[in-house]
Image: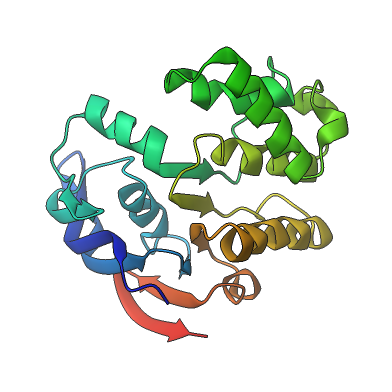
Amino acid sequence: MNKEVIIELKNVWKTYKMGAVEVHALRGLTLKVHKGEFLAIMGPSGSGKSTAMNMVGCLDVPTKGSIYLSGKDISHMRESRLAQIRGKKVGFIFQTFNLLNTLTAKENIKLPMTFQDIASEEREKKAEQLLEMVELGDRMDHKPTEMSGGQQQRVAIARSLSNDPEVILADEPTGNLDSKTGERVLDFLKRLHKEEGKTIVMVTHDRRVAEQAQRTEYLKDGIIVKNLRR
């Protein structure tokens, strides 16, 4: 495995205030993500894995502790700067797909590139290439409501690659899919890892899904309680 650390969480705490009560979603989480690895973060509901994903993906900042992206401390950056970094460094795949129903598959994939000021012609070409890669070249002009769940998730995978990010963050990527379709989506993620050399961080509660990764970190009550390498 490449030993270069691309994302590092050091003693990260995340505390939410709910009235007079403080809820500690993360309790001193320390985690390293190495460039080019396939990592699964696993845990039951309420274990803190979604909060951990938000930290790894620069979607949120910690209450305490530090987060480093390619060696740079991003723990206290402004949201505008974080958004810029996310757009270039991290691609997201969500359980609920998060596609815009008013846009076609191609337009959904072009959207993240628009925010990075990529030329229109290049956006068009890249979107078409990505849809071909996920075997949806014949669905370019279909809207999400005209596609199956598996097809929508493949559009979401293509969209996550639009800005050629270093890290793909997948939050329960098979959660809304039947087992056969879920396996196909996992196959695409494994291809991205093996053939494209992408760093994949996948959050899941499903042991069979986690077994596809090289390493699994098990979360409970906001900390890692054990890990497993394959």
In the picture provided, is 112 more to the left or to the right than 157?
left
Q: Quadrant of the N terminus?
A: bottom left
The spot of residue 89 in percent (x, y) is: 38, 43
Depth check, front residue: 157 or 16:
157
Count of residue discs: 0
The spot of residue 66 in percent (x, y) is: 14, 55
Question: What residue do we see at 64% from left, 64% from top?
Answer: 190
Question: What residue do we see at 67% from left, 55% from top?
Answer: 174
Look at the image and tell me whether residue 186 can be seen: yes
In the picture provided, is 70 more to the left or to the right than 145?
left
Depth check, front residue: 44 or 150:
150
In the picture provided, is 211 more to the left or to the right than 182?
left
The spot of residue 91 in percent (x, y) is: 48, 42
Look at the image and tell me whether residue 100 can be seen: no
Depth check, front residue: 51 or 91:
91
Snapshot quadrant of residue 158: top right
In the picture provided, is 49 more to the left or to the right than 178?
left
Q: Is residue 156 above or below residue 28?
A: above
Snapshot quadrant of residue 11: bottom left
